[in-house]
Image: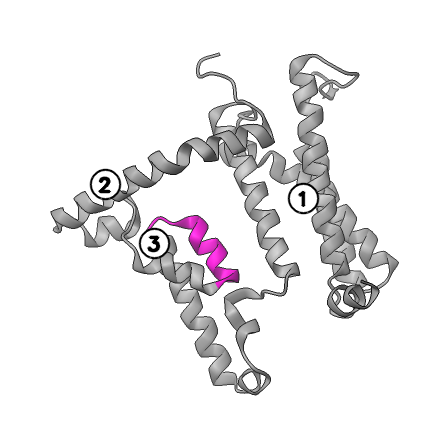
Amino acid sequence: MGDWWHRNIVEPGKLPLLLALTAFVLTFVITRVITRLIRAGKGPFGNVQAGGVHIHHVVPGVVLTVIGGFAAVAGGRHGFGSGLAAVVFGIGAGLVLDEFALILHLDDVYWSEAGRKSVEVVVVTAALVGLLLAGFTPFGVDNMSQAELQDRANVIATVAGNFLFSLLALAKGKARLAIFGVIVPLVAVVGAIRLARPGSFWARRFYTNRPRARAKARLRAYRHDRRWSGPRTTLQNWIGGQPDPPGS
């Protein structure tokens, strides 16, 4: 175990990334527990007020993210300072992304339906960082041999090709596949070759005069959403809490 830890975490300089991810996930979990207790009126916790203004936890999150980010840039990838900076950055990022929906809508939508976006962004972020820790690098460069890496043309072609697949997946309205495709290129290929979602840039541009393609895209999107919206909503509620009913 010690050899694996040194070979895969310490030597490649991944320890700060691991510390940041751990701090990020723990901060999100602890924050959600506390906010759910406040919502239920249990425990010693309460909203932070200053001069009649509700101070959202995104505020200290931004401060910690800035401090941790600059400290990490200044401190390198090794040593106690870099580890501490990574933890500070992870805590700040956890606080910020827990209120991602508030930033997106510029409104307190924490317990509304729109607030689910925060949970989704946190889960996607944790998954992407986990993939980086597992050894994946953006645009599939990790799949190339040492000889291929030394050939600049091969590297450029690999990065450009995988970037194109991610861009196509995004244009087809498949943001999750596009994002994960940056780390795992084959994921973006799936999104790039399948039908676009209705309302996406690709559908508006190329399906306007193709009624059969439009109908097929709508049917596929309906079936996909019917199959996965329920489990996704259940998981988001379990992680982040049940949102308030509309109009409450």
Q: Which residue: 24% across, 49% down? A: 203
Where does the image place residue 202, in percent across and percent down from the top left?
27, 53
232 to 67, vertically: above or below: above
Where does the image place residue 188, in percent across and percent down from the top left?
41, 60
What's the distance in space between the residues labelled 1 and 2, CA to CA? 38 Å
Say what secondary structure mark 3 lies in: helix
Looking at the rendered image, the disc whose residue lies closer to the viewer, 3 or 2, is 2
Task: Please rate how many residues cluster around mark 2, counting C-alpha atoms within 10 Å: few if below 14, some from 14 to 19, many from 20.
Answer: some
Where does the image place residue 230, in percent across and percent down from the top left?
42, 31
Q: Which residue: 54% across, 22% down? A: 242
Say what secondary structure mark 1 lies in: helix
Q: Which residue: 71% across, 19% down? A: 47
Where does the image place residue 79, in percent across and percent down from the top left?
86, 62
Q: What residue does disc 2 label?
A: 219
What's the distance in space between the residues labelled 1 and 3, CA to CA? 28 Å
Q: Amino acid at mark 1?
A: Ala
Q: What residue does disc 1 label?
A: 93
Q: What residue does disc 3 label?
A: 171
Q: How is the image coloured?
A: one colour
Q: Which residue: 52% across, 22% down? A: 243
22 to 158, vertically: above or below: above
Task: Please rate how many residues cluster around mark 1, counting C-alpha atoms within 10 Å: few if below 14, some from 14 to 19, many from 20.
Answer: many
64 to 112, vertically: above or below: below
